[in-house]
Image: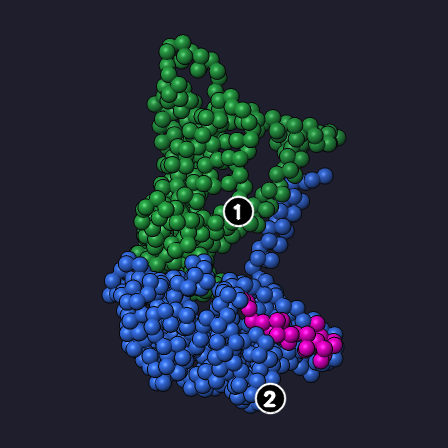
Chain colours: A blue, B green
């Protein structure tokens, strides 16, 4: 019989089950004690990554599994960093579904440092903390550290910057094509803009792909970028933003850019169509250019220093690996994360997959320092980016850097397409930045 | 009505015979409930799923909208009462999105329904290969939003888009579809129209086929032209159907999200450089999943729900007034 009382009870139970499962995700069980850790026990480790982090392509997982036959590594990769971080956030909220190792992009590390430090292993409290810290540039280590000295991520790659240029288009426009001579063309951003004007008087193509290329690369050349020393967003007071805005909005307003939106379809298509002659090149951009243009682009590009790099070297991008503290295999995961980010492996990541190291030992390794890139006309990439990386000052980062940067680059696009004057664009950018930070 | 009750009866017949060995003296009402238990059993799964995936999130969203909180701390945050709603109503981003939603909605819905009506009328004639045409009309509806939008946003591309190439070939100027307000909204409306016209046409067609042929014969005897017949026989007979499609399209228009998100082409959620095609759905997504202010996003979600309620209510009132006026 299906009595109404019983049915009501069943309803209640079903509803309660729904509410319970929805209300509280995983459990807060403490992970296995370090003392119980058996390094030889069979274990499967999951690594959450995004985009092309290339641990797999550089053969590092395979190598580690050969060194440790008891370990099986599975990678869960999400193509877009933003989408990856969204799902990571919901998993942090539910405290379930986290991988044994989670990667963070620089745009999101500050949020993790500030709001979720307790959810991750503190590498600064490890026995080998000093050794670990010594493996990284101090600014890289600092980016993953909290105000009270916890460090929740180990650096993978970095984005020291340079300026890539098309030798064929430069030649057509009567500009020098030799690396050293090109470097003399733009010691400063003002000189770079002058070169742009000169170039566009003789060519149909634009000089630079987008105002975002100028803005995003030069904003980190200031004392501060989007945040004050405490990591609070202050875009309207920052010298880095002010300088970057001046150069980028001038370029946008004068039509010196192809006004493409970076990482969009048209931007991708524009690489092969030779629609622009220069593009700001953080180290990771080389791989992007290569993948967009394929063999047809080999030898067309070369690399010069970023304008203004004499005064201030800057970093754009880079990632970290963190280990969720509540995982089941914390100790084994720590071992793997430390190994993947160790200087020897960073050298391999550079030689096999062109990710520039976040470790000075790796950057000074002959395998990196003497490296040249045939695709980019044999440019000495190890030397160019190594010099840039060594001079980088630590710029404070904050939890909303990605969103604020998007607010500014979007406003620049609006200026370049004639939708706003530079002054209006500035106001719009600040409004959008305030909306993003929730102020 | 008749269709619905028919189904219930059939369900009752298909079910095992009700247990008739009940003890006498039970209240009548209880016995009836017991007799209908299979009915409850059949509808229970729907309501369970509805409760878990609609009602619960719905109430939970209302709760979240009263807090200032972030995506990764969705159960916590500080209680702010109706503060989020006050801020939303004062936010120029909200009014911009509301305006865009309205204009894109009109640009998409009006031509869509007019074209659907015309197509349905044509397909109602005896045509060779009618089934083929009817099937083809439904194809866009079966295409995923993502696939359709990706193709269309390439067609509408500024530098390498097919449409601009064709414009140039016939001597017209290229259009920067994405960056203009009107042009971007037209482009998005085209995607929506392409996808939904066939669907609405089939609904109209089904309704047209239930219009008695005598009405047209009588009209023809009175000397009414085909056009007059369409205006004075077809349209009035379709009125309830038209109202239904308007309501459904309006709800779809208020919720418009996938098309403007993917039209940007680079994953940004600002709906263009000046927010020129940011809809309410996209604003909600930006607040919650780009800026991680999930409380604000929940507020926008509820505001959208209210807007839909008001629009549907207004439609219902208009429909009822028309019906009363006809009587």
Image quadrant assignment for residue B109: top left
**Residue that mark 1 sits on:** B144
Q: Front-most of B253 and A308?
A: A308
On the image, the x and y values in percent for residue B86 come to 33, 56
> Going 29% across and 77% down the picture, which residue do you hit?
A191
Would you place residue B52 above or below residue A388 in this image? Answer: above
Apparent side of residue A11 relative to residue A295 in the rendered image (left or right)? right
> Does residue A146 appear in the picture of this structure?
no
Q: Front-most of B153 and A327?
A: B153
On the image, the x and y values in percent for residue B189 come to 39, 44
- Please provide the residue range marked out in magenta: A50-72
Does the stretch in magenta take in A64?
A: yes
Q: Residues within 10 Å of mark 1 (few under 14, many from 20)?
A: few
**Residue that mark 2 sits on:** A128
Chain letter for mark 2, please: A
Q: Front-most of B79 and A389?
A: A389
Q: Front-most of A377 and B291?
A: A377
On the image, the x and y values in percent for residue B33 come to 63, 34
């Amino acid at each position: 019989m299906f009595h109404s009382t019983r049915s009501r009870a069943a309803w209640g139970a079903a509803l309660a089950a729904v509410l319970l499962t929805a209300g509280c995700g995983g459990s807060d069980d403490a992970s296995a004690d370090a003392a119980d850790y058996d390094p030889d026990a069979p274990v499967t480790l999951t690594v959450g990554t995004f985009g092309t982090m290339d641990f797999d392509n550089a053969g590092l997982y395979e190598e580690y599994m050969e060194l440790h036959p008891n370990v099986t590594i599975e990678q869960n990769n999400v193509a877009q960093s933003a989408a990856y971080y969204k799902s990571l956030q919901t998993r942090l909220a539910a405290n379930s579904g986290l991988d044994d190792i989670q990667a963070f992009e620089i745009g999101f590390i500050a949020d993790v440092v500030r709001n979720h430090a307790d959810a991750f292993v503190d590498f600064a409290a490890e026995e080998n903390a000093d050794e670990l810290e010594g493996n990284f540039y101090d600014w890289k280590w600092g980016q993953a550290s909290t105000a009270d000295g916890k460090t929740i991520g180990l650096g993978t790659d970095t984005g020291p910057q340079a300026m890539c240029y098309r030798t064929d288009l430069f030649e057509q426009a009567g500009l020098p094509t030799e690396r050293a001579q090109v470097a003399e063309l733009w010691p400063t951003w003002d000189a770079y803009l002058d070169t742009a004007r000169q170039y566009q008087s003789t060519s149909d193509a634009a000089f630079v792909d987008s105002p975002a290329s100028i803005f995003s690369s030069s904003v980190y050349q200031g004392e501060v970028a989007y945040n004050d020393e405490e990591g609070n967003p202050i875009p309207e007071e920052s010298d880095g933003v002010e300088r970057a805005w001046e150069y980028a909005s001038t370029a946008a307003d004068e039509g010196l850019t192809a006004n493409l939106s970076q990482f969009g379809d048209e931007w991708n298509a524009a690489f092969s169509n030779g629609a622009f002659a220069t593009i700001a090149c953080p180290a990771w951009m080389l791989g992007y250019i290569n993948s967009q243009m394929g063999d047809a682009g080999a030898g067309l590009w070369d690399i010069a220093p970023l304008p203004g790099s004499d005064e201030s070297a800057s970093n754009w991008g880079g990632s970290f690996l963190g280990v969720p503290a509540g995982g089941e295999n914390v100790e084994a995961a720590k071992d793997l994360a430390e190994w993947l980010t160790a200087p020897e492996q960073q050298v391999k990541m550079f030689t096999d997959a062109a990710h520039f190291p976040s470790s000075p030992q790796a950057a000074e390794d002959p395998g990196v320092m003497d490296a040249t890139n045939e695709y980019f006309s044999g440019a000495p990439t190890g030397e160019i980016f190594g010099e840039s990386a060594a001079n980088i000052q630590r710029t404070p980062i904050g939890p909303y850097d990605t969103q604020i940067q998007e607010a500014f680059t979007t406003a620049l696009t609006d200026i370049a397409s004639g939708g706003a004057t530079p002054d209006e664009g500035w106001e719009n950018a600040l409004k959008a930045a305030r909306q993003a930070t929730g102020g | 009505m008749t269709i619905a009750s028919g189904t219930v009866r059939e369900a009752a017949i298909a079910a095992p015979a009700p247990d008739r060995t009940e003890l006498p003296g039970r209240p009548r009402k209880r016995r009836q409930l017991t007799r209908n238990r299979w009915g409850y059993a059949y509808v229970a799964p729907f309501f369970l799923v509805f409760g878990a995936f609609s009602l619960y999130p719905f109430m939970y969203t209302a709760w979240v909208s009263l807090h200032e909180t972030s995506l990764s701390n969705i159960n916590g945050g500080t209680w702010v009462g109706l503060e989020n709603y006050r801020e939303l109503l004062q936010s120029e981003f909200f009014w911009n999105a509301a305006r865009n939603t309205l204009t894109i909605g009109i640009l998409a819905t009006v031509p869509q329904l007019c074209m659907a009506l015309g197509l349905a009328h044509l397909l109602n004639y005896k045509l060779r290969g009618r089934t083929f045409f009817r099937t083809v009309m439904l194809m866009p509806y079966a295409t995923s939003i993502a696939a359709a939008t990706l193709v269309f946003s390439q067609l509408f591309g500024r530098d390498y888009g097919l449409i601009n190439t064709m414009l140039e070939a016939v001597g017209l100027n290229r259009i920067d579809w994405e960056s203009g307000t009107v042009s971007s909204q037209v482009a998005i409306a085209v995607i929506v129209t392409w996808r939904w016209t066939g669907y609405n046409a089939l609904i109209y067609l089904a309704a047209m086929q239930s219009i008695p042929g005598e009405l047209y014969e009588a009209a023809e005897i009175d000397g009414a032209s085909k056009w007059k017949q369409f205006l004075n026989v077809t349209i009035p007979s379709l009125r309830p159907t038209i109202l239904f499609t308007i309501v459904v399209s309006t709800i779809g228009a208020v919720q418009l999200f996938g098309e403007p998100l993917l039209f940007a082409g680079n994953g940004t959620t600002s709906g263009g450089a000046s927010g020129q095609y940011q809809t309410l759905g996209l604003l909600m997504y930006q607040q919650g999943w780009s800026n991680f202010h999930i409380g604000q996003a929940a507020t926008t979600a509820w505001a959208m729900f209210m807007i839909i309620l008001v629009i549907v209510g207004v439609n219902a009132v208009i429909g009822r007034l028309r019906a009363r006026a006809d009587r």
